[in-house]
Image (spheres, coloured by chain):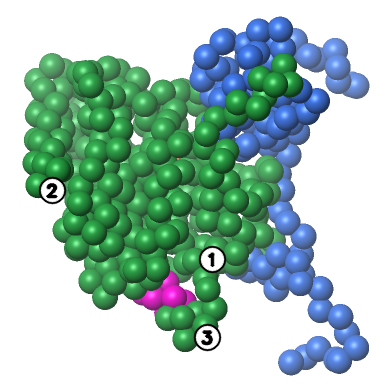
Amino acid sequence: MGLKKEEKYIYKYEACWSDGNNPLLCLNTGDWRTSRPVINNEICNGCGICMTFCPPQCISIKDDYFLINLGFCKGCGICAKECPKKAITMTQEGDYADDCKI
Amino acid sequence: MAEKLNKLPKVTEYFCDEDQFSPGNACCPGCIMELNLRLVSKIMGKDSILLGTPGCSAPTIHGQNDRAWHKHSYYACVMTGVASSATGLARYYKKAGIDATIVCHTGDGCAQDIGIQTISGAAERNENIIYICYDNEGYMNTGVQRSSATPYGAATSTTPVGLKSIGKTTNSKNMPMIMAMHDIPYVATATLSHLEDYAKKLTKAKEMVKQGFVYLHVFCPCTVGWKVKPDSSITVCRAAVQSNYFPLWEVGNGAYRITQPVAKPKPINEMLKLIGKFNHLKDQEISVLQQQSDNRFSILQALCSIRA
Ligand SMILES: Cc1ncc(C[n+]2csc(CCOP(=O)(O)OP(=O)(O)O)c2C)c(N)n1
Ligand code: SF4
């Protein structure tokens, strides 16, 4: 109603308290993690069970291997528990402290 | 490795769309209600219309502040009226000649307590709605209060354990059976340890909703409220199926069928020991739970034998 004809209405994603003008909401849930899943590709037989059970669905296929998107992995450990080959181990995030630029 | 990757789990064959949810959303780590939402999104397709109520799925379905967490069309309802709001939507789309799948996604508190009269009404009117209830056996979002889905002996914030108190003293409602008794086209129970079984039921629901009301009851442990380790929620689902505490069954047009029969059911204790909210139970209370679960299962078996 209030829109002028030439004004372009950009419809993105509508939410309860939004007019559909805004992009999708997304948290960096990777920040919540205290331990990270590490896949041993030697043992992995490619069954994809980890991928289907991952609650945030952040495991994808990349060049014949499974890749975990650590930006969103919350570190719940379901993949490591469900893997029939025990190819995934949960490793303390602290062990990766050297990776961070402090 | 490349050819091995071709053997991905069968559930992936049922996916017909991309996951419409944002990759980082606010569910607790290990909460499989999030997996449930993403699965529903992938199988129902991007054009399905979601309805939600306040509860743990609300932050993810409703959006927050001024943004959305997903790309579906959705309707944020009050807890008392989700099925009647869905009725309005379903009828509108029917009149307008638009083919739309209406999916309500609410917790057990809404489905079994606060909103049961509108669900029962919509089921009796046989509206074209899919109703998915994720059963986390309590009001989780408001701080783990007991609901009518909370089982006997469970510790919650309103049925605490003490010197004299053993947790909840009454049994839970058998909601899927209540819905089955409405004689609607399709009722099924599902859980997230048996993804292929669940995917089949979702696909069937999409088909059966053309005939009328569809109700799916999904067993969905809450890691926080049940005091389950975040990595164990799928294990708990599997244990619930294997002990016949939560049998997987469906009823389509009057024919009952157990979809995942268990050859040698395990004692219910195998499941209870994984769950912190049952840790205080003694043998006597465990046998009460076992008895209740056996009774329910024998009713189900009797129904299955009618048209076998
Ligand atoms: C009519 C009404 N009563 C109470 C509330 C408060 N309330 C908000 S969320 C919630 C819990 C919902 O529980 P459930 O539907 O089981 O979903 P869960 O939190 O377990 O995912 C309650 C009681 C409300 N919003 N509306
Ligand atoms: S409180 Fe329970 S049901 Fe709610 S998001 Fe957390 S784990 Fe899931």
Q: Residue at position x 65%, y 13% from top?
A: A44
Name the chain under label 2. B
Marks 1 and 3 belong to one chain: yes
What residue does disc 3 label?
B96
For marks 2 and 1, give the one nearer the viewer: 2
Q: Residue at position x 67%, y 68% from top?
A: A14
Chain A painted colour: blue
- Assess mark 1: CB under 8 A from ligand 1? no
Q: Is residue B87 magenta?
A: yes
Q: Is residue B259 above or below residue B59?
A: above
Q: Is residue B287 above or below residue B82?
A: above
Classify residue B2 by image quadrant.
top right
Q: Residue at position x 52%, y 71% from top?
A: B100
**With A84 as the anchor, is B69 left or right in this view?**
right
**With A96 as the anchor, is B277 left or right in this view?**
left
Chain drawn in green: B
Tell how many labels: 3
Image quadrant containing the C terminus of chain B: top left
Name the chain under label 1. B
Q: Is residue B299 visible?
A: no
| Highlighted range, magenta | B84-90
How far across and how far down the image is residue A82, in percent?
Answer: 51, 20
Q: Amino acid at mark 1?
A: Ile
Labelled disc at residue B307: 2
For marks 1 and 3, give the one nearer the viewer: 3
- Assess mark 2: CB under 8 A from ligand 1? no
Q: Residue at position x 63%, y 37% from top?
A: A57
Q: Tag 3 or tag 1, which sits nearer the N-term?
A: 1
Q: Helix, strand or loop at disc 2? A: loop
